[in-house]
Structure formats: structure tokens, C-alpha cells
Image (spheres, grey):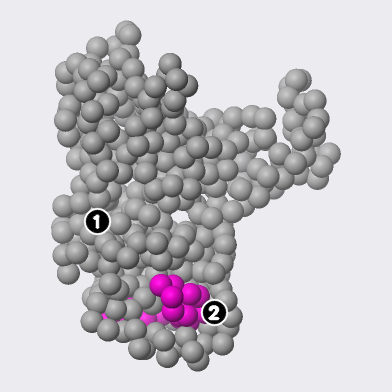
């Protein structure tokens, strides 16, 4: 076994992830028997990173969606988590340590592990006959790996020369159902995006930090003088160990990801590159500014979208209202628009504030909200697995 396999990857801060274990014990006997007995004729699904943040949400989603009659669900994690017992679809299942043999007989393996773990192990799963559906950044821009949002480009799953399919970054994903539907009808040419990204995009550590900061400023008259929020946090013992480069409570932070050339953040480049690949528009003009906001979960995006021709707001609304995975909430006069606080915890992408840009021809302005832990991570990964399973 490689060194990487023995790393505690399932407890690392999970991008787009939520902590929360489903372990109900560590005695595997009953679970093993249930596992063997359940290995019927359906396809075999493996979840690599099952005890981690997004992995846990994947298990919830598998429980809630009976779409695929999996013959076996195999849970895989780092050696440190092996032996735990998690309950999925009414059965206790023992977590196995990541090793080449655990992929034998697996039809589809969903990965939610750090990039370097996916980079090593997704090809191993593929070499053993599984289709690897990977939620890391390791393969997203590989030309031989499709990057899939089933509502937009489900057909791409069939062309997978490496046996690997990638799941997009949650920021891009949060607008893809909407932009894919509008592009199909109206031929998208340009996107200018500002994101409003939730703390949970930085994993459980981001959630914990936001709650701690909110507790530290609660009831205090701060946010009225430059630096007073940071001083209040420091006085409460919240120092520089934050996953965010500035206070998030009572603030917005124009930064997410790592520094790339010319002042761009990795997150902004992902929005550009991944949007082009998913929508199949290699020359799509995209410019993004990614901003972290004091929201626990659900990324929002303000989108300025130029199309090949003028698009009437009513026509855009009709197209979006007809999308099964999109909720249109767009009645400004009635105070109806999407907000993270209203949409968090659900599967659909919400859209509203649709307006004709006043000074830009053929351009709509809109506001989109999507749960970064569900559609932005676990749900889309599982929907890809469902799409693959339907064609096995
Ligand atoms: C974030 N989109 O919100 C990133 C996580 N992949 O930080």
C-alpha cells in the first residue's frame, strides 16, 4: 500500500464539505454478513472517502434516492477509519481500507478525497474495471476526462478514455443548471460573475470558524471602525489560524482559493475553465470575482450573461421554470428572490432577479443560489454515478 493511502485523508478539511460521521459502531460481524447478503445482481458502488465530509452527505443522498438498485455498496476510507460501521439503505456496512483489491468487482467508484489521493487512486479503480467519479480537482481539466453536470452534458459520460469522470468545483456547479438551460435556448457568449461563497466551501473548519467569529462579535457594537472586528476576534482568542484571510463575521472577503498568475485566484480560474468545458463553449468569455460571505452553506452568484441575440426576460423565465432541477423565484414586487437562508439544504438550483441589462445588448442579469454541499458536491457526483449506472 502506498504512503498516500495511509494518510488520514478522510478527516482533512473537505473542500465543499460538511463534517459529520455516520459511524454507529466498530464491530463488523453483522455488517459483513449484511454486506455479503446484499451483494445481489445490481451494480456495485464504492464510496472512497465514505467517512469524510462529502462522503457522509453522499450516504444521506443514497438513502433518500432509491433510483439505482445497487447490488452492493462498498465503503472505503483511510486505514485509520477502516473497521467503522456505517448504515446505508438500511444495512450496516463495514468501512474497508483503501487498497487496490477493494475495487475488484466495483462498477462505479465515487471519490471524495484530496486531489493527490484521487490522482493516485482513481486510475487504480479504473484499471480494476470501475468507472471512477471524482470530486477532486485532480482531473477536471484533463482533456481525456469528461467534466459532467447531468442536466447539461450527460452524454459526456460515455466518452471516458481513462475510465474517470470529474465532478466540477462547487462554485461553477452552483450556476450550471441555469446557464446550461439558457445556453441551449439562447446561445451564451459571455459570462461575468461575482460569487458570494459560503464558509462551508472551506470545509468543516470554515463552518466552525464562522460560528466562532459570530459568537465573538455577538452583542458588541463592532463593525463601526476599521480593524475593530479583527481586534474583537483577537481578544476572543481567534487569531490567524483562520481558513479565511480576513474576518468573515460582519464582513465580506474578496478571496477564495490560492493565488495564481496576475492576481487571479484559483477559484476564479476554475469558474472560467470549468464553465467552458461543461457548456462546450471553448471560447466562452468569462470573468469572475470570487468573494467569501458570512453564510454557512449555499453559494450564490450574480451573473451577467450575454447571448447571441436579445432574450426577453419572460422567455428566460419560461425556459428556467421548465427545468426540473431549477426553481424560479422571481417576483421583485412581492419581495420574492432566492437567498441562501431560504434555499440551503435542498437539491435544486434557485434563480431570480432576472433583468434585461440596461446598457449591454443581448444581456441578462440574474442571481443564482445552490447548496454547495449538495448539488455543489455530493449530489452531482451521485447523479453522475446514476447516469453511468443507467447505461451499464
Ligand atoms: C470554496 N469552491 O467554496 C470552494 C471549495 N471547492 O472554497
Q: Is residue 226 left or right of residue 98?
A: right
In front of the other: 132 or 379: 379
In front of the other: 106 or 120: 106
Picture coordinates of residue 370, whole percent (x, y)? 42, 41
Numbered circles on residues, count: 2
Instruction: Give, as a single range, the part of the protein colored magenta.
Output: 84-106
Asked whether residue 392 appears in the rendered view, the answer is yes
Seen in the picture, residue 145 relative to 263 is either above or below; the reply is: below
Please identify, in this view, whether the residue under mark 2 or under mark 1 is nearer the observer.
2
Q: Residues within 10 Å of mark 2 (few under 14, many from 20)?
A: many
Whole-angstrom CA distance, mark 2 to mark 1, is: 32 Å
Instruction: Give the quarter of the figure containing the C terminus.
Output: bottom left
Asked whether residue 136 appears in the rendered view, the answer is no
Q: Is residue 100 magenta?
A: yes
**Residue visible at 24% across and 77% down in the picture:** 42
**In the structure shown, which secondary structural element does the residue marked by tag 2 occupy?**
loop
Picture coordinates of residue 309, whole percent (x, y)? 16, 18
The circle drawn on residue 46 is none
* Residue underneath mark 2: 84
Seen in the picture, residue 33 relative to 229 is either above or below; the reply is: below
**Residue visible at 31% across and 27% down in the picture:** 191
First of labels 2, 1 by sequence position: 2
The reply to whether the residue tagged 2 has its Cβ within 8 angstroms of ligand 1 is no
* Residue underneath mark 1: 145
**In the structure shown, which secondary structural element does the residue marked by tag 1 occupy?**
loop
**Residue visible at 50% across and 37% down in the picture:** 342
Q: Is residue 292 left or right of residue 278?
A: right
Residue sitting farthest toward the top = 359
The reply to whether the residue tagged 1 has its Cβ within 8 angstroms of ligand 1 is no
Picture coordinates of residue 88, whole percent (x, y)? 44, 72
Q: Is residue 332 magenta?
A: no
Q: Residues within 10 Å of mark 1 (few under 14, many from 20)?
A: many
Amino acid at each position: 500500500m502506498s504512503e498516500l493511502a495511509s494518510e488520514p485523508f478522510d478527516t482533512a478539511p473537505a473542500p465543499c464539505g460538511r463534517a459529520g460521521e455516520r459511524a454507529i459502531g466498530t464491530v463488523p460481524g453483522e455488517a459483513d454478513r449484511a454486506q455479503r447478503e446484499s451483494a445481489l445482481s445490481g451494480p456495485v458502488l464504492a464510496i472512497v472517502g465514505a467517512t469524510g465530509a462529502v462522503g457522509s452527505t453522499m450516504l444521506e443522498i443514497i438513502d433518500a434516492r432509491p433510483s439505482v438498485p445497487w447490488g452492493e455498496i462498498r465503503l472505503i476510507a483511510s486505514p485509520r477509519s477502516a473497521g467503522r460501521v456505517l448504515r446505508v439503505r438500511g444495512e450496516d456496512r463495514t468501512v474497508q481500507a483503501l487498497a487496490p483489491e477493494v475495487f475488484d468487482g466495483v462498477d462505479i467508484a465515487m471519490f471524495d478525497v484530496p486531489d493527490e489521493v484521487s490522482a493516485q487512486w482513481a486510475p487504480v479503480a479504473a484499471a480494476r474495471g470501475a468507472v471512477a467519479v471524482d470530486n477532486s480537482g485532480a482531473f477536471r481539466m484533463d482533456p481525456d476526462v469528461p467534466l459532467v453536470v447531468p442536466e447539461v452534458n450527460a452524454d459526456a459520460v460515455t466518452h471516458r478514455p481513462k475510465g474517470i469522470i470529474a465532478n466540477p468545483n462547487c462554485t461553477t456547479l452552483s450556476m450550471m443548471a441555469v446557464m446550461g438551460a439558457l445556453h441551449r435556448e439562447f446561445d451564451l457568449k459571455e459570462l461575468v460573475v461575482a460569487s458570494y461563497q459560503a464558509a462551508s466551501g472551506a470545509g468543516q473548519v470554515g463552518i466552525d470558524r464562522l460560528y466562532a467569529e459570530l459568537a465573538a462579535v455577538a452583542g458588541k457594537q463592532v463593525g463601526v471602525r476599521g480593524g475593530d472586528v479583527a481586534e474583537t476576534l483577537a481578544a476572543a482568542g481567534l487569531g490567524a489560524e483562520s481558513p479565511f484571510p480576513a474576518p468573515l463575521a460582519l464582513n465580506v472577503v474578496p478571496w477564495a482559493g490560492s493565488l495564481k498568475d496576475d492576481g487571479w485566484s484559483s477559484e476564479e480560474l476554475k469558474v472560467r475553465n470549468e464553465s467552458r468545458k461543461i457548456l462546450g463553449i471553448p471560447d466562452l468569455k468569462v470573468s469572475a470575482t470570487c468573494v467569501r460571505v458570512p453564510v454557512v452553506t449555499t453559494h450564490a452568484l450574480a451573473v451577467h450573461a450575454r447571448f447571441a441575440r436579445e432574450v426577453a426576460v419572460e422567455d428566460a423565465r419560461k425556459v428556467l421554470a421548465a427545468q426540473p432541477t431549477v426553481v424560479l423565484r422571481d417576483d421583485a414586487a412581492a419581495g420574492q428572490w432566492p437567498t441562501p437562508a431560504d434555499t440551503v439544504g435542498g437539491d435544486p438550483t434557485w434563480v431570480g432577479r432576472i433583468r434585461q441589462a440596461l446598457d449591454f445588448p443581448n444581456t441578462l442579469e440574474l442571481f443564482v443560489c445552490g447548496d454547495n454541499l449538495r448539488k455543489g458536491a455530493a449530489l452531482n457526483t451521485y447523479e453522475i454515478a446514476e447516469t453511468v449506472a443507467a447505461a451499464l
